[in-house]
Amino acid sequence: MIRTRRTSLSLDLALLALLACLVGFIAYRITVHLDYAWHWGEIPQYILRHDDRTGRWVPNYLLRGLFTTLRLSLWGGLLALALGLAMALARTGRSLYWRLIARTYVLLLRNLPPLVIIFLFYFFLADQLIPHLALDVRARKAGPGVRWLLSLLVAEPGSISAFLSAVCTLALFEGAYITEILRAGIESVERGQWEAAHALGLRRHQVLRHVVLPQAFRQVLPTLAGQFISLVKDSSIVSVISIQELTYQGSQLMASTYLTIEVWVTVALMYMLLTFPCSLLVARLEARLARRHGGDGHDWGCLCRGEEVL
């Protein structure tokens, strides 16, 4: 065993040395052989700017784009989770009609490129439906407090319709994947627990709420977290419909300043700022659920057998 550990340690050190050499070679090629004039000092002004009128530092292009990406991901993720849960329950339900609808939705959305879905939904559906709600007009007529809250949580009053179209498009696309994730989680629950719950007199919705769904979510939590992180990255595709999220702001800034590498490296780091904390948070949540897993399973097993849970 000691010899195996030494071999593993030697291999790790060799791989680490190889990685360090690779990073050094890339850095050498960039600094010495790349014919590019670096202007990193100009980047901070596009993240924060000083407002002479108020005397405060306010978000500039890149930071505003980051906030828009965060709002897109948050609302798109919540809507995708709700849609995915509804479709997963339909796929595992008793009704053949709803199973066919859910299966058609999954097969259609998972086999179309995201860019095609964006254009189809935005130009042929959302562009015909959402403007009739006159959300932008109503937002402009609202009071200052309501407009400030909308700007903070959703979008500027003149961009709410486009923002909602982007959120719905992302939710439709990501919801198809979440549907399959939750369906797998529901089907991973042993059939005996369904039968035991029915034997205790629980209805189907009670079984789902109290028995099946808590276990299913615990089983698929890492996969759901990965899908949410994927949603943060996939939100960049709505830049093609002029939603001013981080990728759109980066492309516009690059076109006007020609700071190609500086802008895109900064954009990449800002995406990491969103996704990496999510990974750490989910890892902690997964570890916490794993510690509680044994107690929950024992309590439910006792309940199914009609025993008293102490």
Image (cartoon, rainbow, N blue to C red):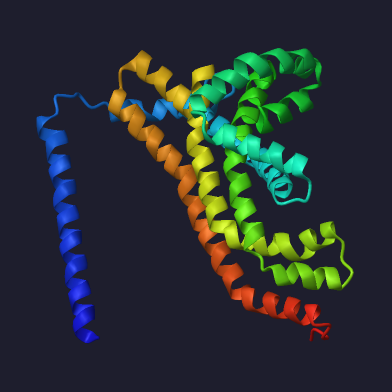
**Quadrant location, the N terminus:** bottom left
Quarter residue 185 falls in: bottom right
Q: Is residue 57 left or right of residue 256?
A: right
Residue 80 shows in the view: yes
* 108 to the left or right of 264: right
Q: Residue at x 75, y 50 (%)?
A: 93
Furthest residue toward front: 96
Q: Position of residue 227 (x, y in %)?
A: 53, 46
Q: Is residue 208 above or below residue 26?
A: below
Q: Name the residue located 54 percent from the left edge and 18 percent from the top edge.
A: 241
Residue 239 horizontal side relative to residue 89, left or right = left
Write the residue at 80% across / 63% down: 207
- Up-down relation of residue 232 to residue 205 (above or below): above
Of all residues, the one furthest to the right in this rendering is 201
Residue 60 visible to the viewer: no
43 or 133: nearer the viewer: 133
At which x and y percent is residue 186? 67, 58
Q: Is residue 118 above or below residue 152?
A: above
Question: Residue 151 appears at what percent x and percent y?
Answer: 67, 27
Q: Position of residue 282 (x, y in %)?
A: 54, 57
Q: Is residue 181 left or right of residue 210?
A: left
Q: The C terminus is located in which quarter?
A: bottom right
Q: Residue most toward the left?
A: 33
Rendered view: 69 above or below 308 = above
